Amino acid sequence: MEYSIKSGSPQKQRSACLVAGVHESRKLTPAAQAVDAAADRLLSNLLRKGDMDGKIGQSLLLHNVPGIFADRLLLVGCGKQGDLDDRQYRKIIVNSVKQLKQTGATEAVSFLPTLEVRNRDYPWRIQSAVQFIDHELYQFKEFKSKNKEPKKSLRKITLMVPGRRELQQNEPALTRGIALAAGVKLTRDLANRPANTCTPTHLAEQAVELGKTYPSVEVTVLEEEEMKDLGMNSLLSVSQGSAQPAKLVVFRYQGAGDDSKPVVLVGKGITFDTGGISIKPASAMDEMKFDMCGAASVFGAVAAVAGMEMPINLVGLTPAVENMPSGTATKPGDIFTSMSGQTVEVLNTDAEGRLILCDALTYSEQFEPAAVIDIATLTGAVIIALGKHATGLLSNHDPLAAELLKAGETAGDRAWQLPLWEEYEKQLDSPFADMANIGGREAGTITAACFLSKFARKFHWAHLDIAGTAWVSGKNKCATGRPVPLLVQYLTRHCEKRN
């Protein structure tokens, strides 16, 4: 998809489709008013007859409107004027794209970014419009035998701003929106690939390709022998049941000076999770290919940051393994010494994500990070607690948690903080090792984070449990690309605060 911004009068835009808004009670937006004047009050007359009221979700497609150069005019319901918030703006943009896809138009000019959104400026509206449009148009067809774009598909959208001053001001926002959309798409593509394609080796290969696409990103891949030398026995305990070798991908993006401490992102990369010896039920096990969505989100965030040329130092770590049952697989009750020197009794081999993350967290110490954020489809318990709407957030540093929560609100990719209290740690007690890898049924999301916190005591750390938000199930199952928007917004704000 090609995106651009432009200024100009609605009636003078030569386009396959012009998009303008109508507020509730049939009130035309300024762009629609200009078209109405050029068309001798055609729109006012149609609305007066009841063709459209202006509620969000409504639309009206008109052909050959007199007085304008566009082939079509798409009117989109925008709700009550002055009452538009972030989520309503997204609904309006998404509705316009759904209608455009049905028209056969290959390009369109949209005046929807000129809508007033409560507490949101033009750059936010431009960047978000690109993000919302790209998300709605996303399709995953890599494994379809008939994988051809239809001749009449939407390929270009021009987003309109009032004048030349706004045009210049919003070019960076367009660039950010395009980079963010590319990062989200990369995340979704990686996560949607089947596990027989998207192996740990495939992730490592894709990381190398990402480094070629963005020369500012340095990529290193650690092999099993190197991890063994580092003492990453907890990580390797998960991969020992699989024929697929584990990989640890290290991204380094240097957009700021050497004296600037990096933010480290650590993404769980279980490319398929059978549960190991503690095997999962067969129902919906195919969705366990999504257990690498944390790693995929690190890929996406790194790509977005590099695409924006963000003035920040960033490290991405993605431990990638398969969790399989076999004669060499970890058994419940086995004990391993982690890279930190702490010992772990594995009571449940299906609680494997924390076993690979803990060694990656210890590995991150060498970068002397400003903050470390891990991202993982870690617990089903977070879905019981928060449903599919919010990412679970736990942290050992309240200011970091607050910044992530604020970033989620701004990006429309929300999280909710859960407590990380010392009392919960007792559930991880083991009579044989320093800790067990599970803490029982109660507070499963919290005890999983408590486990990770034992490996994050030397830095400010936050944990994002995306088990409920990383993908949708059912007939339209698909990776969502979350929490890439949250992460990129946090990193953007981190740059602004530092400068």
Image (tube, rainbow, N blue to C red):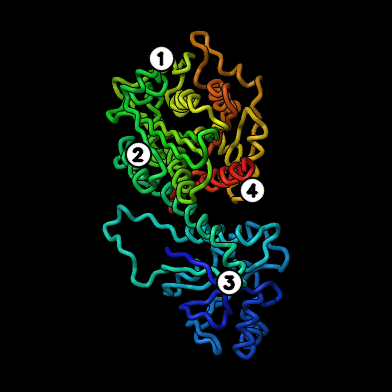
Q: In the rendered view, would you say 356 is above or below 165?
A: above
State the residue position of label 4: 409
The tag earlier along the polypeptide, 3 or 1, is 3
The C terminus: image quadrant: top right
Q: Earlier in the sequence, mark 3 or mark 4?
A: 3
Asked if residue 139 is positioned above or below residue 316 in the image, the reply reads: below
Name the residue at 61% across, 80% down.
Answer: 51
In this view, 280 is above or below 490: above
Q: What amino acid is labelled 4 in the image?
A: Glu
Q: Are marks 1 and 2 in contact (CB under 8 Å)?
A: no
Q: Which mark is residue 334?
A: 1
Q: Residues within 10 Å of mark 2 (few under 14, many from 20)?
A: many
User: Gap in Å between the C-alphas at discs 2 and 4?
Assistant: 30 Å
**C-alpha span from label 1 to label 2:** 28 Å
The residue carrying mark 3 is 111
Q: Amino acid at mark 3?
A: Phe
Task: Give residue 92's mark.
Answer: none
Residue 7 picture quarter = bottom right
